[in-house]
Image (spheres, grey):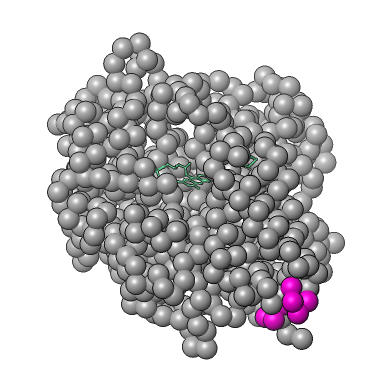
């Protein structure tokens, strides 16, 4: 994708996907979260330009949409790497050693939580319980769930993402 | 083949597992009687009859609070002006309570069972719109649900004129932007409307005024999954399924240092120790069990003296805790109760929606004090301060919703059962669980 396409306007596919969500709902503004997730899907994050374009499409103010975007953990208002690495830090994973796993991930990627690897491949973020507590400690990379994860597994896991 | 009359929730998916299939597909679901209950309900029963049936079966909500489902459905206006226009059925599939992983399992493995339960639930309140409010991180359940909904629609189980009747139902999945508070049902409704997920004032309660101001029922995934088999087999069958007072089966779960962590559908009233020893394979070698959070991160600790109790609502409540989601988290003797409490408070502090002061300001403060104690900076008197503030923050009514109460319950029970550990941190100025 060229630089110009990464900022607004929204692509025809994005508009179509957002309109399909609106069709399930009584009014356009109700699709705010769906729309943010749809646009983030391909672009990785929500830029100010994307935000303004979505607000325009939904007929709401940019400020209103931003207050919604910033409320939710999974909507990113800053650029992230190609794959978001989420290491669960909730209680079952805590009991099964998630602190050690996070340490190993930090070392392997060379970043702290919130950081992105220099090659732009991975962003490391903490995440609450992934609903995989029987596979603790668990982590998710992009849309893929892994667990239980040992430090030795990390090369294999990260190797699967370009 | 598993017996669906004793394992109505998981019999099918265990068969699919045994056959090497990851999911109960439409063919397998229908071959084992699937969608017959919805057909029977929509073509042969009135909404009032279904509500009565579910009430008689004593189905209680599996989302944490245990409210009787049929009673809740009975609050929806069914005639007069209030009943005109849209009504909504919303499935709460937010599942963000740490330690809880049962709804993911049901949706990933047997999505048609949930859809069938929602068709019947929607008919019971004459809702014409239904939503699954799904955690944003749940990618595999999302894929499975989207596929299953498309299949159900192509068979005429969803859409216009279901089973050749005049009943119409649209079902859509709403993915959450991610915040624990979205699971609280009124916050969920705000999120569904595309807003910030802040809880709403009650009353009005959602059955009177919910999504977009219309009558709305919010039910947990597992609750709705129970409905088809109740229609097929009747209320008496469901009442008999439980081992004690409570009706039906429950998907119980165990996580922590056991040999075989996982989920099992067992009769309500199965004793805690039986779940841990017979199903989860007991503790791993070298680890001793000290306490459990019986139903997720917001439930109070139970300890040795409670492990022979049956998992049923009244019994667990009398023991000072809650059944919650029925997925228990085990604390073994290698885990520091102070640091585990800090981990729990970190979650609740981070996930506070920020609306009211005791929760927004109090929980981070509690987390910090626990960190201080854990790291050897505790002072004499800190535990009394913690006791007092826990009381203040946690008392229902001091905050706008039950998030803060749920946060404080495990802490108060830790202060009660593991007080020696807290005191040792303060008197020795270090955590005895950390290597020197
Ligand atoms: C802070 C908070 C979080 C909650 N999270 C969930 C959840 O993730 N899933 C759920 O089913 N219920 C959750 N609940 C309970 C819901 O408010 C509601 O009681 C439940 O969805 C009703 O369904 P049921 O009657 O079928 O159990 C939560 C409650 C609170 C106070
Ligand atoms: S108790 Fe906490 S989560 Fe609930 S409304 Fe108040 S600040 Fe929000
Ligand atoms: S606590 Fe980590 S997946 Fe549930």
Say if A42 sits above or below B209 in the image: below
**Picture quadrant of residue B396:** top right
Q: Residue at x 58, y 26 (%)?
A: A30
For the point 24% across and 60% down, the residue is: B244
Q: Main secondary structure of the magenta part?
A: loop
Residue B215 in the image: x percent, y percent?
41, 24
Q: Quadrant of residue B187?
A: top right
Q: As drawn, is B222 to the left or to the right of B132?
A: left
A30 or B78: which is nearer to us?
B78
Which residue is nearer to you in this view: B195 or B32? B195
Residue extending farthest to the bottom is: B286
The N terminus of chain B - image quarter = bottom left
Q: Is residue B290 magenta?
A: no
Is residue A80 visible in the rendered image? The answer is yes
Q: Is residue A153 visible?
A: no
Where residue A89 sits: x, y (%)? 65, 63
Relative vertical location of residue B385 with respect to residue B303 in this rendering, above or below: above
Specify the quadrant of the image occupied by residue A36.
Answer: top right
Closest to the observer: A57 or B324? B324
Residue A52 in the image: x percent, y percent?
76, 27
Q: How many marks?
A: 0
The residue depicted at 50 percent of the width and 72 percent of the height is: B291
Between B197 and B169, the one nearer to me in the picture: B197
* Residue B68 relative to residue A143: left or right: left
In the rendering, at what x and y percent does residue A62 appear?
76, 26
Q: Residue at x 52, y 88 (%)?
A: B286
Magenta residues, as a range?
B426-433
Q: Quadrant of ligand 2?
A: top right
């Amino acid at each position: 994708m060229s630089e110009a396409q990464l900022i607004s306007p929204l692509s025809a596919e994005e508009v179509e996907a957002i309109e399909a969500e609106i069709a399930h709902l009584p009014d356009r503004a109700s699709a705010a979260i769906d729309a943010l997730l749809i646009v983030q899907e391909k672009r990785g994050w929500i830029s100010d330009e994307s935000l303004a374009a979505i607000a325009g499409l939904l007929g709401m103010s940019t400020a209103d949409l931003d207050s919604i975007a910033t409320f939710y953990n999974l909507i990113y208002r800053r650029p992230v790497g190609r794959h978001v690495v989420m290491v669960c830090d909730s209680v079952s994973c805590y009991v099964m050693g998630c602190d050690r796993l996070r340490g190993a991930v930090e070392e392997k990627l060379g970043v702290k939580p919130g950081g992105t690897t220099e090659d732009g491949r991975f962003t490391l973020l903490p995440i609450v319980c992934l609903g995989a507590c029987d596979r603790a400690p668990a982590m998710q990379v992009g849309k893929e769930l892994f667990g239980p994860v040992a430090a030795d597994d990390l090369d294999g896991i990260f190797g699967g993402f370009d | 083949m598993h017996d669906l009359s004793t394992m109505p929730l998981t019999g099918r998916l265990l068969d699919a597992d045994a056959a090497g299939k990851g999911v109960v597909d439409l063919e397998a679901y229908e071959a084992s009687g699937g969608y017959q209950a919805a057909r029977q309900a929509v073509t042969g029963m009135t909404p009032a009859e279904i509500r009565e049936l579910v009430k008689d079966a004593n189905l209680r909500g599996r989302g944490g609070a245990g409210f009787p489902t049929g009673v809740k459905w009975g609050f929806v206006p069914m005639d007069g002006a209030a009943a005109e226009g849209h009504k909504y059925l919303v499935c709460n599939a937010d599942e963000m309570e740490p330690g809880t992983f049962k709804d993911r399992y049901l949706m990933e493995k047997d999505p048609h069972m949930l859809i069938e339960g929602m068709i019947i639930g929607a008919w019971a309140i004459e809702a014409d719109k239904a939503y699954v409010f799904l955690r944003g991180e749940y990618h595999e359940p999302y894929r499975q649900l989207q596929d299953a909904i498309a299949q159900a629609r192509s068979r005429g189980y969803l859409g216009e004129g279901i089973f050749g009747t005049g009943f119409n139902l649209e079902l859509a999945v709403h993915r959450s932007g991610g915040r624990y508070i979205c699971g609280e049902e009124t916050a969920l409704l705000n999120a569904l409307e595309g807003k910030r997920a802040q809880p709403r004032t009650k009353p009005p309660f959602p059955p009177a005024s919910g999504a977009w101001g219309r009558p709305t029922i919010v039910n947990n995934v597992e609750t709705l999954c129970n409905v088809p088999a109740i229609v097929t087999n009747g209320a008496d069958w469901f009442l008999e399924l439980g081992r004690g007072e409570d009706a039906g089966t429950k998907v119980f779960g165990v996580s922590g240092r056991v040999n075989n962590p996982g989920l099992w559908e067992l009769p309500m009233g199965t004793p805690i120790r039986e779940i841990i020893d017979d199903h989860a394979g007991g503790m791993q070698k070298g680890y001793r069990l000290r306490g459990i959070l019986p139903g997720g991160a917001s439930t109070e600790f139970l300890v040795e003296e409670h492990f022979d109790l049956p998992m049923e609502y009244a019994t667990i409540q009398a023991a000072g805790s809650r059944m919650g989601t029925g997925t228990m988290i085990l604390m073994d003797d290698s885990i520091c109760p102070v640091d585990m409490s800090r981990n729990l408070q970190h979650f609740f502090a981070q996930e506070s929606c920020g609306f009211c002061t005791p929760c927004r300001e109090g929980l981070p403060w509690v987390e910090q004090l626990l960190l201080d104690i854990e790291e050897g900076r505790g002072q004499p008197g800190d535990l009394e301060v913690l006791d007092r503030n826990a009381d203040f923050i946690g008392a229902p009514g001091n905050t706008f919703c039950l998030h803060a109460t749920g946060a404080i319950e495990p802490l108060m029970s830790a202060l009660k059962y593991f007080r020696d550990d807290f005191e040792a941190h303060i008197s020795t100025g270090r955590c005895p669980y950390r290597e020197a």
